């Protein structure tokens, strides 16, 4: 059984940490079974070596029979060679088990995060997701490597007990009772480790989220003079996490110390009892040698059993966190009515905003959060009474809304990859474009787009976002690798790349919040002209206060305290609404100058 990028990872068991680990085992049970068999045979053959040595001493060395000694010695060499091969195969098999569990858990977590969609951030912090993806997944996969050796250790332990029974009943009883005693001594520590590990993981996720917040707002903090204050708070939090890590390490050190020390005391007792019985003549010299060998061979299964308990204790804590994440549910979608077949009015009763289809509409407000709240309601990212035509958005299945209404978030994530893939196209053979989304307005029986069509769509999107200079400035054009979040691009370049990506999808309704806030006046004027032209005849809503954008809008809604206070064109509102004029007239003369200027002409 293998797992690859195209395989369904299956439906995980979300009833608890142990059940999730068991599900991972069931999903690759042939491989886990093979690992258990290989580990069992490997460990049993480790114990077979002392048995063969005892035969060599009793039947060859002691009576002086060189042929018998050679036979038993050859058998030991053969068993050693076979065991070396078994050890290699066991390790390879358990590595595959670990990798499968790792990738399967990653696919499950990423797939569920995708299903949660926009509700993800409202239900779990970024740090929690990062901690699961970076730490918990690795811990879970590592814990599964104990499955094969753990089963093998139990089988080998029973086998050694049986071999010891043929030597001495007393020694066999000591061996068979030793591990339960070890379990009773180590069990409380395993439970304590789970509690400490769970608390450590929680603190780690909180601190990880804070690191992300600091990285994103460091410039702002520095400008406000709050960098030192936040640094002190982070220092305290990281110190608490370090102390919790020490507590986890203290429990782990006791487990490892007892895991090494107690077996040695136990095995020393077996050796002492065997030596006494040999001195008393109850067992032969060869049997005494075998007892020493069995004691050494027992070290492996005992060590594996303790390691298995340690790894599974940590693994179940990580699995519980994954299960808790998988139990999160997306917002219920009870829509049963089809979306309007034709372009229709979007209406938000809470604010009074009405979006007429086929027009460029702008929302202007002193508080940007009021405008983004309206966009979220119009795109059904938050519950509301918004309607599309005469149909409440809540009555329309969410996939229909997502396929036709798009929010261009100014802080939308940009994943690492070539620039063409960041924008949304497939890999390019040269400096051209790749695949792009086909317009939902295309007829159902339309032919798939040709390569030339795809290139034309991508070129149009880049042109509308005034991003050609970005492509020209990069060494390999669209083939140039871009870092995660496009950190190697400027803020204005990232904004235009996000806009080009949104335009490439060609949505029926495009909602954008401050799409040009990071651009200079010249570039902003160019984007405003090209955006209006590219979206002609389709519904576009912009939340902005830039007069360069507002001058090109067909309709402008002036919002006060989240509600429509006035509606008209940019010029009408400037003439009749003092509040609107005070808000947007910061560069109104420049807007007037660029309103009739040729495309690309600098604004004054």
Image (spheres, rainbow, N blue to C red):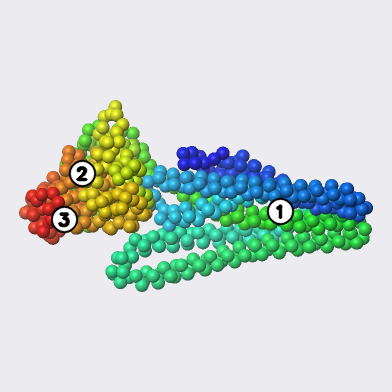
Quadrant of the image containing the N terminus? top right
- Residue for badge 3: 522
Residue 278: x and y, percent? 89, 59
Q: From this viewpoint, is residue 92 visible?
A: yes
Secondary structure under the numbered disc 3 in the rendered image: helix
| Discs 1, 3 touching: Cβ within 8 Å | no
For residue 527, side relative to residue 576 (left or right): right
Element under label 2?
Answer: strand
Of circles 3 and 2, which is in front? 3
> Mark 1, residues whose alpha carbon is within 10 Å: few (<14), some, or many (≥20)?
many
Residue at x 50%, y 46% (from the top left corner): 103
Q: Looking at the picture, how far across and down is residue 235, in whole percent?
A: 43, 70
Whole-percent x, y for residue 577 in the image: 9, 55
- Per the model, the C-alpha gap separating discs 1 and 3 is 74 Å
Q: Quadrant of the C terminus?
A: bottom left
What residue do we see at 44% from left, 44% from top?
111
Q: Is residue 399 above or below residue 514?
A: above
Marks 2 and 1, how far apart in space? 68 Å
Looking at the image, is mark 3 or mark 2 earlier in the sequence?
Answer: 3
- Kindly identify which residue carries mark 1: 301
Read off the residue under disc 2.
Answer: 540
User: Residue 343 lies in what quarter of the image?
Assistant: top left
Q: Is residue 20 left or right of residue 405?
A: right
First in residue order: circle 1 vs circle 3:
1
- Give the residue at x 36% y 38%: 334
In the image, 85: left or right of 434? right
Residue 162 in view in this figure:
no
Element on which disc 1 rests = helix
Residue 559 x, y percent position in the rendering: 18, 53
In front of the other: label 1 or label 3? Answer: 3
Q: Residue at x 20, y 39 (%)?
A: 538
């Amino acid at each position: 059984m293998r797992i690859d990028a195209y395989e369904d990872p299956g439906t995980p068991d979300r009833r608890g940490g142990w059940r999730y680990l068991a599900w991972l085992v069931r999903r690759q049970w042939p491989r886990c079974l093979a690992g258990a068999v290989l580990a069992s045979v490997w460990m049993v053959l480790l114990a077979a070596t002392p048995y063969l040595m005892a035969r060599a001493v009793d039947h060859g060395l002691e009576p002086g029979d060189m042929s018998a000694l050679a036979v038993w010695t050859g058998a030991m060499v053969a068993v050693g060679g076979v065991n070396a091969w078994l050890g290699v195969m066991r390790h390879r098999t358990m590595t595959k088990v670990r990798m499968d569990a790792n990738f399967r858990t990653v696919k499950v977590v990423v797939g569920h995060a995708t299903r949660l969609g926009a509700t993800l951030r409202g239900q779990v912090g970024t740090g929690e997701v990062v901690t699961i993806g970076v730490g918990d997944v690795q811990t879970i996969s590592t814990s599964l490597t104990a499955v094969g050796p753990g089963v093998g250790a139990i089988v080998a332990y029973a086998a050694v007990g049986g071999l010891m029974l043929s030597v001495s009943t007393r020694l066999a009883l000591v061996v068979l009772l030793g591990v339960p005693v070890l379990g009773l001594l180590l069990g409380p520590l395993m439970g304590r480790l789970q509690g400490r590990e769970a608390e450590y993981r929680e603190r780690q996720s909180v601190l990880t989220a804070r690191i992300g917040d600091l990285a994103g707002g460091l410039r702002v903090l520095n400008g406000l003079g709050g960098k030192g204050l936040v640094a002190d708070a982070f220092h305290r939090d990281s110190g608490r996490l370090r102390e919790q890590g020490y507590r986890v390490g203290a429990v782990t050190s006791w487990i490892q110390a007892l895991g090494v020390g107690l077996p040695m005391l136990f095995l020393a007792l077996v050796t002492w009892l065997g030596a006494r019985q040999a001195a008393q003549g109850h067992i032969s010299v060869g049997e005494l040698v075998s007892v020493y060998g069995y004691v050494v061979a027992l070290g492996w299964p005992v060590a594996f059993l303790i390691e298995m308990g340690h790894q599974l204790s940590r693994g179940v804590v990580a699995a519980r966190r994954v299960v808790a994440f998988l139990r999160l549910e997306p917002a219920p979608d009870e829509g049963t009515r089809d979306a309007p077949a034709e372009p229709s009015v979007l209406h938000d009763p809470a604010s009074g905003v009405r979006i007429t289809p086929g027009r460029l509409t702008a929302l202007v407000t002193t508080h940007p959060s009021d405008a983004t709240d309206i966009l979220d309601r119009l795109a059904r990212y938050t519950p509301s009474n918004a309607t599309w035509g005469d149909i409440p958005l809540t009555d329309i299945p969410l996939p229909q809304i997502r396929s036709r209404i798009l929010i261009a978030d100014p802080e939308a994530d940009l994943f690492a990859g070539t620039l063409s893939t960041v924008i949304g196209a497939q890999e390019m053979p040269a400096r051209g474009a790749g695949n792009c989304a086909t317009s939902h307005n295309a007829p159902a029986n339309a032919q798939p787009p040709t390569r030339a069509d795809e290139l034309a769509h991508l070129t149009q999107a880049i042109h509308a976002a005034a991003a050609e200079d970005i492509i020209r400035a990069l060494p390999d054009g669209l083939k140039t690798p871009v870092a995660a979040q496009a950190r190697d691009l400027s803020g204005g370049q990232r904004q235009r790349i996000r806009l080009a990506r949104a335009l490439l999808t060609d949505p029926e309704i495009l909602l954008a919040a401050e799409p040009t806030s990071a651009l200079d006046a010249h570039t902003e004027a160019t984007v405003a002209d090209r955006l209006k032209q590219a979206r002609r005849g389709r519904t576009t809503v912009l939340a902005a206060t830039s007069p360069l954008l507002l001058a090109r809008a067909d309709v402008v809604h002036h919002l006060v305290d989240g509600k429509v206070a006035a509606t008209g064109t940019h010029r009408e509102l400037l003439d009749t609404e003092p509040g609107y004029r005070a808000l947007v007239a910061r560069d109104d003369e420049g807007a007037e100058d660029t309103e009739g200027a040729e495309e690309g002409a600098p604004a004054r």
